[in-house]
Image (cartoon, rainbow, N blue to C red):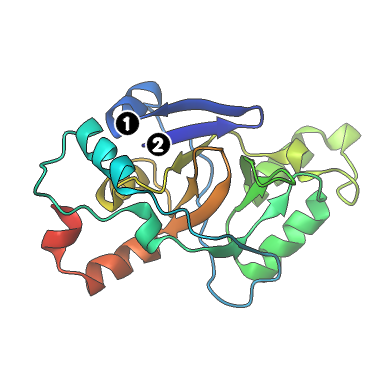
Amino acid sequence: MFSIYDYDGRVFRNTLEELYKVNPVDRSPASLEPKNHGLSHASHIQSHIPNKSSIDAYKNLIHANPKDELRHAYEIMQEEFEVLKEGQTVYEGLSLLSKSGNKVIPVTTENNRIVGLFDPTSAIKNLIDNDDNAPNIRITPVRDFLSGEVITAEPVTSIRRIAEVMNHYNLVLVPVVDAYDALVGVISSRDIARAIANDPPISLWT
C-alpha cells in the first residue's frame, strides 16, 4: 500500500495501480539518499512488524499468488535516519543537508507524523521567488519550505512494488509510514540493491 502526504495530512492511500492513476506525472519531491553513518540528527524508531493477518490481507489486496513468498518493506527498511522537526529553522535544515550530503530530509511533527520533505532546491527557489521580501532563514521554520507532496509506503508493502514506484517517479528513497501516519523507516535504492544482491531473486521478486 502507498500513501501521499502533504502538510495537512494524508491525501491518498491505495494500491500501486491506483497511485499511478491519481499521480500520473512526476510531481514527487526531490529524492532522498540517506547515510548510514555519522548522523547528526537521527531518528531511531522500533520496527513496525505487521502480523500474519495483515500480511495475508495485503496479499489478497494485490492478488498475489498464495504460494508467493513476498518480501516486505519492514524487512529491509532503515530505522536510523536523519529527520527534521517542522519547527526547526530553514538554516538548520540547510546546515544538516550540507553536512550529511543528503538531497532531502523527511520533516515530521513533534509526535512523528510525517508532513513532507525538505530539500535545498525548493528552499532556494522560495528564497529567489521572494527576493524582495526574503524570509530570515535563521528563524523561519522548515514547515514553510516543504517541497510538496511525498509518496510513502506501508511496512507491509512488497519490495518489488516499492522498487517500481521508485523507478516510475525517479526516487532514491521512499519513507515508510505506519497506519497512524508515523514515520517508522526509510527505504533507499541502496537498500533495494542490497536486498537483491543478498537474496535469491526468486524469493524477492516472485
Query: What numbered label is drawn on residue 128?
Result: none
User: Which quadrant of the view contains residue 130?
Assistant: top right
Tag on residue 15? 1
Q: Amino acid at mark 2?
A: Phe
Residue at 53%, 53% (x, y): give it.
184
Location of residue 198 (image quadrant)? bottom left
Neighbours of disc 2 within 10 Å: few (<14), some (14-19), many (20+): many
Q: Is residue 118 left or right of residue 150?
A: right
Q: Which residue is mark 2?
A: 2
Residue 154, compared with residue 43, is above or below; it is above
Q: Distance between the Cα atoms at labels 1 and 2?
A: 6 Å
Coordinates of residue 5 in the picture (x, y in percent) = 55, 33
Provide the secondary structure element on which disc 1 rests. Answer: loop
Q: Are marks 1 and 2 in contact (CB under 8 Å)?
A: yes
Hey, which quadrant is residue 58 in on the image? Answer: top left
Residue shown at 32%/31% (left/top)? Answer: 15
Q: Residue furthest bottom?
A: 38
| Dot 1 alpha-carbon crowd within 10 angstroms: few under 14, some 14 to 19, many 20 or more | some
On the image, the x and y values in percent for residue 95 come to 76, 62
The answer to whether residue 185 of the structure is visible from this angle is yes
Q: Earlier in the sequence, mark 1 or mark 2?
A: 2
Q: State whether residue 27 appears in this view.
A: no
Amino acid residing under circle 1:
Thr
Q: Residue at x 62, y 40 (%)?
A: 116
Residue 196, image x, y percentages: 24, 66
Task: Locate residue 184 relative to residue 7 in the image: left or right.
Answer: left
Which quadrant, please, contains the N terminus?
top left
Q: Secondary structure at mark 2?
A: strand
| Front position in the image: 75 or 152 | 75
61 to the left or right of 64: right
